[in-house]
Every structure is written in C-alpha cells, then in structure tokens.
Amino acid sequence: MAKENVKIEDISKPVEQLVKLTLDDLMPLPPPYDKPGEEPELTEPTPDWREKYVTDLDGYIAIDLPWKPKTKEEEEELVRKFLSGLQKLLDKENNWTFLQPLMLSVEYCARCQTCSDACPIYISSGRKEIYRPTYRAEVLRRIIKKYLTPGGKIKAKFTGDIDLNANTIIRLAEDAYRCTLCRRCTQTCPIGVDNGLISHEIRKLFSQEMGIAPKALHELGTVQHLQKGSSTGLTPDGFKDIIEFIEDDIEEKLGRRIKIPVDEKGAEILLIHNAGEYLSWPENPAAFAILFEEAGISWTLSSEQVAYDAVNYGVWYDDVQLARVATKHTEIAAKLEVDKIVVGECGHAHKAISVVADRVLADEYNIPRESCMPILWDIVRKKKINFDPEKNNFPVTLHDPCNMVRLMGVVEPQRKILRELCPQFREMEPHGVYNYCCGGGSGFAIMQSMNFPEWRSAVAARMKFKQTLEAFKDCISPEINKYLCAPCSNCKGAIRDMLDYYNAPEKCSIYYGGLVELMVNAMVDLEEPFIEWEFH
Amino acid sequence: MIWLQALVYFSFTVFVLVVLAKVVKYATMPIHLRWELYPVPHEKGRAEHGGSYFEEADWWKKPRETTLIGELKDMFMEMLFIKRVFEHKRPLWWFTYPFHTGIYLILTWFALVFIGAIFEIAGFPISAASVQQLGFLSWLSPLIYYLTWIVGVLAMALMLIFGLGLLFRRLGDEGMRSYSAPIDYFNLLFIIAVVATGIAAWQYDGDFAVARAFMKSLITFSPLPSISGATILHVTLLSLLFLYLPFTKMTHFFGKYFTYHKVLWEDEPNLRGGEIEKEVKKVLGYRISWSAPHMKPGMTWADEVLKVSPNEIDVWKKEEK
C-alpha cells in the first residue's frame, strides 16, 4: 500500500495511500522517551473515514469535509475548478495580496534543497518526501507550467512532468495542511524563495475558489467568528458572564475586587485576547487585568461581537476572510475611540492585525495596532509593580511563537521579563527568530477532527517536545515542577495536547502557561502563588 | 563572418531587453500584503536578535531607525559568499560557491577585455611590456594584460571543474535528483559546453589578443578579425546562451533583489494618510471573481469586506445528487 521514496509524479498515482508513517521512522526523542513503548502507537484511519474523507496522502485527515470525488464527472469538475482557481491565484485583481511573492517563489527555486533540513516536520517524520518544503511547491510549479502556459504539455517533458487528476488535487490540498507556515525554510533560502508561502497559496486556492478548508478554520472559524462573535462560539452575553467570573476569581486571589473595564469609550488601549483564553485559561486574561490595573494603564475590553476574540484564522487560508475579520476589529476600536489596539498573548492575532492585514486597512479603519509585550516589559522595567523574582524560583523555558517572533520581530521584551523575574530561566535551542514551531501553527492547534491531533502531536510537535526535554534535561525528574512559558493561545493549545500525548506532566512534571501568569506569580502583593501547577 | 557579429549584437540586445521586461514586470506588480521575515537586517540595533520596531510601545509615534549598512552587509555576504548555503548545506556550497565565483570572474574578464579594447582603440596597445605613451601610467597596459590572463584562466577552470561537479552532485544527491527535470541538466551542460569551447578557443589565443580584437570590432562596428573554428563555435554557443538565459530561472541574479528587498525585508508600515495607504485604497478597488460560497464574485475587495453581511456568508456543503 504505502510507497517509499515518493517522487513528485507519484502524487497523481492511483494508490490508496501514498505514505504510511511508523514510529520507527520518526525522529528519536531524548530521555526519558528514548526507549520503545514510551509513546503511543500510531493508528490507521477507520474504513469509514477512508470512504468519506481524503486519507490518500498519509492516512491523516486535516480537511474534515466529505469532498472526495466519487464519480468520473465529479473528478473532472474538480480538475476544472482547481485550474480555474489556479488562474485566479496568478491574476492581479484576484490575488494582488500575494501575487509578487508567489510568482517569485514559483519562478526562482533552484531545487537545491538547502531549505529541507530547516523544516521540523520533514525532520521529525524521518524525512518523508511529501513533507519536504519543496514537495508541494514543485507539484504546484509543474502544474502551472504544464497546464497554464502555452505549449506547456510539450515543454513539460523537458521542464518536469506531472499529471493533474483528482488524486493530485486531493493530495495537494491535504499536503498544504502538513506545513505550519512557520517559514523556517525561507530563512535558509539563498534566493529568498518562500515554500511556506506556497502552502498558504494552495490553501487559499481551495478556500477562495471552492470553499474547501478545515471546518475549524472556516465554517467554525472565521465564518462563526463573523456571525456569532467568536470562533469559540462565545456570545457577548457569555463573554460578560466570564468577565464576572474572572473578577470573582481575582478577588479571591488578590484579596480585593478589580472592575475589569468593558466597552469603556475613550480608553487608551483596546485589549483583545484570543477568546480561547476565556474558556480554557481564564487565569491569563485575569493576570492581564491585574497587571494593567496595578500599573495604572488606561484600557478596555470590548463585548461587541468579533472584538472580544482577537483570532483571525483568515491569515492561514483565506485573504478575504482575513480582511473581513481585521476590518471588523479596527471598526470596533474606532467606535470605542481608543488610541490603539493591543493584542494579548496570541501569536497569529499579533501577526494578522499588525503585519499581514496592515495593507487591507485604510482611513478610519487604519488604527495603530501593537503587541502587548513592550507594554508588559515597560511595567517591569519602570518598576510600576513590585516583583519578587524568588517567587518564580523554578525552572522556566520560553517557547517563541513563530507569528510573534520570526514573522513579526517581537523577540526581546518577553525574554527581558523572564530574565528579570525568573531566576532559573533557560533558553531552548534554537530560539528567538530561529525557533521551532510548537506544531500547532497555521491552525493545527485548533484542528481536532478525527486522527489529525495524533499527527500533530506525533510529528508536527515532535521537535518542540524534543527541545523542551532538552531545555529541562538537568531537572527532568518528576519531583521538580517545570514551566514551559508559551505566550500564545494556539501554541498553548498545541503544547497542552503535546504534553498530554506524551504524558509529560506525569512523567516529567512539565507544565505550561503564559507569560503574564509568571509576572503575577512574582508580585509582592500576592499572598498565595498565582500559578497552581495543575494540568488543564 | 558578418552573421556571427550580427548574432552577438542580436543576442545581447535580446538579453538586455528581456531582462528589463522581466524587471519591469515584477516592479510594476501591485502592492502585496506584508510578509516580512525576521531577522530583517535594516532594523537598526535590533537586527542582531532579529527584532523589529514592534518591540517598542507606541512605535508609530517614534522615528523608525533603519540602517542601510546592515542591509548592504547581509546582501553582500549573500552575493559574494552565498552565506545561506554555507550555513545550511555545506556539501553543496563547496561546489556552488567556486562555480559562482567563476561566473563573477568571467564577468570581470569581459570587463577587462572591454577595457583593453578601449585602450587599443585609443591607441595604447595592451601587451606584456609597458607602454611609454601612457607616461607615468605605463604600467597599466601590462596590468590589464596579465590580469585578463589570470582572471580568464581562473574563471574557465572554476566554471568547468565545478560546473561538472554540480552536474554530478545533482545526479548523486537523491533529494536533488528526484526534483530535477531534464532542463536542470541541460542548463548545466549548456554552460559547461560554452566554457569548454571557450577553453578550446583559448588554445588559439593564448594571451587573449584575439578576444580583445574581437571586442574592438564589436565596439567599433567594424569587421571581425580572423578567428579560429573553435572561437566561432564558442561565440555562437555563448550568444545562444545569452538568448536563452533571460527565459530561465538563472535570472535569479535579479530575482533575488525582489525576494529580499520587496518581500522578506519589506516592513514599511501603512501609516494613516501615507503613500502606502494610497496604494492600498487602489488595490481594494480591484474586483474579485473567486467563486467559493463565501464570496460575492464581481464585487471589489472593499465591498466584499464592508458590504457583505456576515449572515450572507455561505459555506461548502455536500451537493445532494
């Protein structure tokens, strides 16, 4: 069934499944995971899934829609739609958003494979060809040359051939969701070719032309965000209830009540959190509230639909949805007459609103946007709050969210805080702009359908797990509580699932959380520790 | 030999025009969404750790500090040493670096032959002996003479040896071989053939005096000197290479400018009322024809964003047959 040494042309072959992963192939992990039986076995997709969904690439399902064509007509229709989408991807008006970067990357790759080893997924998988950064790019390049340029069919014999059929298309779509868009590969390219971007553009083609995207990103993601107010399904009323609950919680911990400002017109800052924080990690928005209030910052949250959820999943798969969500965020900020939008601990929301969507905003929607990190560092640097680093005297390491660091350049403020407040802070290797993705990048953290979480934890997050174990190797014993600081909701989600998958809280006492929790934990004013060492 | 001379003029003209057309094509593409990648070397005081102006609260109120030196440094490290391959794929670097050095040297050789030809046209012959007419600059003639020889021979040797090396590496490296198409081998073989015929022509022109005479004819539009069969073959192949080059990915010598300066290092913020905002307004007027259920084909980007109500947004559903 499975076929090794997969070639570019093999993507179109009529086999049930192109590649099969086994534990033996995967990158070995350091102690205590260096012995067999220390991690779960990989599973096979069920016959029902095979029937309904696309398991034809590696057996895993990212796109959880039953879109696999069943008849000859459906297959032909799929090819026709794919080509029409591809034409639009190369068209100025339809894809002004990325036309220049895309064309450059299609044109100039020398296939030197300098980028391959930069990819954590390719390496973690034991160098499976379908995960090589250049694989999907080369497939797309060959399709463009053969099917969309004059004389392409003849030239293809010379410039690299490929068959465009339904197999090619369904596998290419899945393969675009085996890259976390971390763009580590791009850092190594001598020509500046961006294979991460190619994954992004393939995803866009499927979404923007056919509406094909993982439900968690589209139907339950951006669409639900715009229609109901949040991709978590949280409504404005639900949001207000949670805020009250957080105020109660703060009162319990701080010994006095804080009124969390909501919809306060004219505040300096509109702070937006990833709404996942309210539901999964309410201690994070609580910590923000404590710090901002204690430091005397003028700020507010918004209870208006869309604006209490900083996420913008469009940044991973659809430019129009990206623009719709970003514009809604800034529209609400303008109504509140704030000076600026500040994004909480959410990496992709940072990048989406500050960097990528910067060029879809104009006039009243063009409101300054910034990261929370420099503000948090200012609190520490200017001693606006009294901290006692001894309260954080346990091993701490930092995960760098790709979107905030490599893709936005916010590198130092967060580590300055850790150096100041955590005596046992140690870096992972590599770190900063050369970090590895948590494995949850580009939407993977929230894609929980069928067997995708298994692939994410076993393959995509494997490098992060290895780095984490290595950073704590001097104190790996379960008797010592360790804190993996991940200032990003999606990274936290992926890390939670990763630690759980490898049973690391129990085996090694590795816990995870955000940055502000560590800051509040170090506050002199707090009698009880803020960090509770509970895995959730 | 008028046909050969015509071929040289023709292919050189086509080369320049097609390269220019391609540069114009990329330069006039619409503004794109920001997609920079850190480290961005012009971020003053921050490039070392890969930081950006976003590390500063209220960044838009403060002057943006950039450093051209930082950018040039990174650029030249890449251009002159192919730094990224050195760091990330050393085994390939041992081949590709000397090969590319050979290309730089052969371009230098052309420049030297051109300068030599200009000297000769001006009446100062290029030879191993010093030229008295040049007075205190009499050493210039032998300098050009020897430099041309050393640079030319070194360039040919590097390009031939490491061109073949790259060919064998492409065949020997599994990852490279399975991604290579016939054209990748053809390109290398083409260059190797041009260099090999160049070496053959050199056998009849040990000190490149004929090369200079050839250049003189090209500059002055006068008939070519008498040349060997090897030279005719070499010049023909070289002209064909020049005709072919601009249509291939080997134009990455200018493509790199765009990938770095216009994409990976392009971090210009869209400030209210600024030039970028004007550009943004223009592209938001472009029309969309995407046909997914959540799109309204025919609308402009601005209307897709502002005028489509969330409740009108449809999603993919399995069609019932």
Image (tube, rainbow, N blue to C red):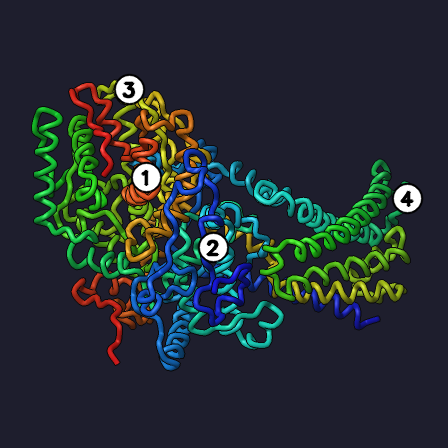
The quarter of the rendered structure image containing the N terminus of chain B is: bottom right
Q: Earlier in the sequence, mark 3 or mark 1?
A: 3
Tell me the quarter of the picture where residue B212 sits: bottom right
> Disc 4 sits on a residue from what chain?
B
- In the rendered image, residue B54, in percent from the top left (x then y), is placed at 35, 38
* Number of callouts: 4
Q: Are marks 2 and 1 on the same chain?
A: yes
Which SS class for mark 1?
A: loop
Looking at the image, which is closer to me, A451 or A282? A451
The correct choice, above or below, for A533 with respect to B101 in the image is above
- Res. A503 mark: 1
Q: Residues within 10 Å of mark 3 (few under 14, many from 20)?
A: many
How far apart marks 4 and 1 lie (CA) works out to: 78 Å
The nearer-to-camera label among 4 and 3 is 3
Tag 2 residue: A131
Tag 3 residue: A389
> Disc 3 sits on a residue from what chain?
A
- In the rendered image, residue A277, in percent from the top left (x then y), is placed at 21, 42
Q: Are marks 3 and 2 in contact (CB under 8 Å)?
A: no
Kind of residue at badge 1:
Asn
Q: Earlier in the sequence, mark 3 or mark 2?
A: 2
Q: Are marks 4 and 1 in contact (CB under 8 Å)?
A: no
Kind of residue at badge 2:
Tyr
Q: Are marks 2 and 4 on the same chain?
A: no
